[in-house]
Image: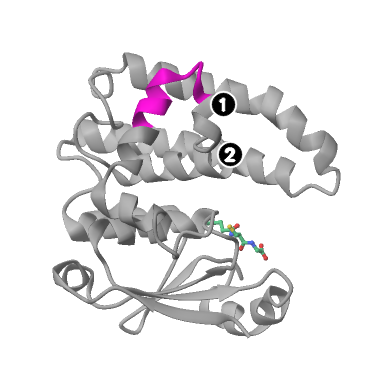
Amino acid sequence: MPSTKSYGTPGASNEKIGGVPVLHYFDFQSRGRGQVIRLLWEDAGIAYNDIRYSFEEYPKYKATKISELNPTTNIPVIELNGRILTQSYAILRHFARQLGKYDGQTEEEKYWADAMCDIVVDWRTLFITAFFSENKDTTYPQHCKGNRVRFLKAMNTHLSSHDASRSGPFIIGANVTYADLVLYQLLHDEQLTQDGRAGLKEYPRLKELVDAIENRPNIKAFLGSERYLG
Ligand SMILES: N[C@@H](CCC(=O)N[C@@H](CS)C(=O)NCC(=O)O)C(=O)O
């Protein structure tokens, strides 16, 4: 049986998004595309219901409940006041607009946050292919030496040289965006936010962003709570 847990007390942010959302996602520690959505909700103080499917039980629910909710039969899926929301990045952008933050103020800031997010989308696809391969022992080390280095260098260069990003700590400067959470979560899932940030030594601008995300009060509380599963 999938596990269902409720977190938080509904408040102003829930009103802005239209209620208490229900997330359907894997029971995959605090990782993956679905975790970025949880992170946004945690940061924004949104109460939510968390339905987690183990990898073993997921195929059964994919063929039934999930395929009824989402024609592509993928998760994350969100139910919110009779609506069904799919596609994790569209979901993040949607909540950012509803909350009136997390996506920049100017068109230039919104473009830049979206652009940085889209790079991480490409990176995550390559990460997942290598990490979940049947030949993981070969493909993941290859990924770490190849594509991962390419993306780490690219993101560090973008964030240290673009006018909007240079001042830091986030992608558009002082204000956090959904794209920062997308980038943070991938760095986390690649095991680069842990182990004293050893894997980010050569990428100081990314380390700065990770430190700033983890210092946000609600995220700090989340990471120190039993809700954080590694
Ligand atoms: N573009 C989609 C991709 C969704 C996706 O591929 N989700 C994965 C989990 S992160 C999934 O559904 N895996 C199980 C499956 O394909 O059966 C999104 O961002 O939501």
Tell me which residue sits at (64%, 85%) in the image.
64
Image vertical order of residue 167 relative to residue 40, above or below: above
Determine the secondary structure under disc 2.
Answer: loop
**Which percent across, then down, holds residue 92?**
35, 55
Magenta span includes 205:
yes
- The residue carrying mark 1 is 199
In the rendered structure, which segment of residues is drawn in magenta?
Answer: 199-209
Tell me which residue sits at (49%, 60%) in the image.
34
Magenta span includes 21:
no
Image vertical order of residue 11 relative to residue 212, above or below: below
Tell me which residue sits at (65%, 76%) in the image.
62
| Tags 2 and 1 touching, CB below 8 Å | yes
- The residue carrying mark 2 is 191
Ligand 1 quadrant in view: bottom right
**Hey, what amino acid is under mark 2?**
Gln
Q: CA distance from mark 2 to mark 1?
A: 8 Å
For disc 1, the neighbor class at 10 Å (few under 14, some 14 to 19, many from 20) is some
